[in-house]
Image (cartoon, helix red, strand yellow):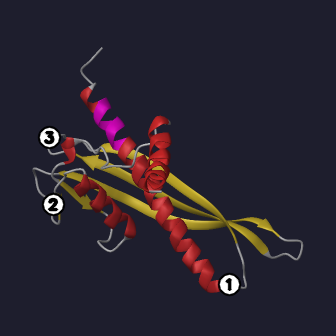
Amino acid sequence: MNRIRRLLVLLPATLLSGCGFTLRGASDWPSELDPIYIDGLDARDPLYLLLVQNLRAAGADVLENPSPVAAELRVLSLREHRRVLSVTSAARISEYELIRVLDAELRLPDAAEPLPLGRLEASRIYVFDAASVLTRSEREEELGRAMDRDLLRMLNLRVQAALRGRHGEGRD
């Protein structure tokens, strides 16, 4: 019986490793972002907290105050809005789209000009149920966290691309 239990535990692990699945580890934020100061987000904002957690997991020192030797990630704007996607035959809203838009730039200690990171957008669609107001707010919070994770992944990729472009300026 003990042997069967071990087999049942090892079988899914073996199948997952064979298909290329890997657990999500620390992100690959570039080393040029150590140390880093984040400007433009409130320290209690969920996106700020997730960004700090992610940068620290990658080994970066996140500063509470700006420093001339630190990179600076400047969030120029963070906007949220929702739009109606569909309406029932009784003229009631049935679906919303939640949208978060982030505009940012990166300032490096040795650069004269900031590196524009541009506009990043994440969205989620959800079915609206007027009868469950509490569920609606909880659902919007859950979708907001998912959009923050998406924005963070896009921001990471945009930072990496901007730094690669900066390093490749002198090449033919």
Magenta span has 160?
yes
Stretch in magenta: 158-165
* Residue sitting at x 26%, y 18%: 171
- Please state if 87 lies on the left or on the right of 47 as rendered: right
Report the amino acid beneath label 1. Answer: Ser
Mark 3 vs 2, N-terminal side = 2
Query: Is 85 or 54 nearer to us in this picture?
Result: 54
Q: Position of residue 141 (x, y in %)?
A: 51, 73
**Which residue is disc 2 drawn over?**
66
Circles 3, 1 touching at the beta carbon (< 8 Å): no
Mark 1 Cα within 10 Å, few/some/many (few <14, many 20+)?
few
Mark 2 Cα within 10 Å, few/some/many (few <14, many 20+)?
some
**Which residue is disc 3 drawn over?**
110
* Residue sitting at x 62%, y 78%: 136
Residue lying furthest right = 89
Circles 3, 2 touching at the beta carbon (< 8 Å): no
Q: Main secondary structure of the magenta part?
A: helix
**Which residue is disc 1 drawn over?**
132
- Please state if 121 lies on the left or on the right of 71 as rendered: right
* Residue sitting at x 45%, y 60%: 148
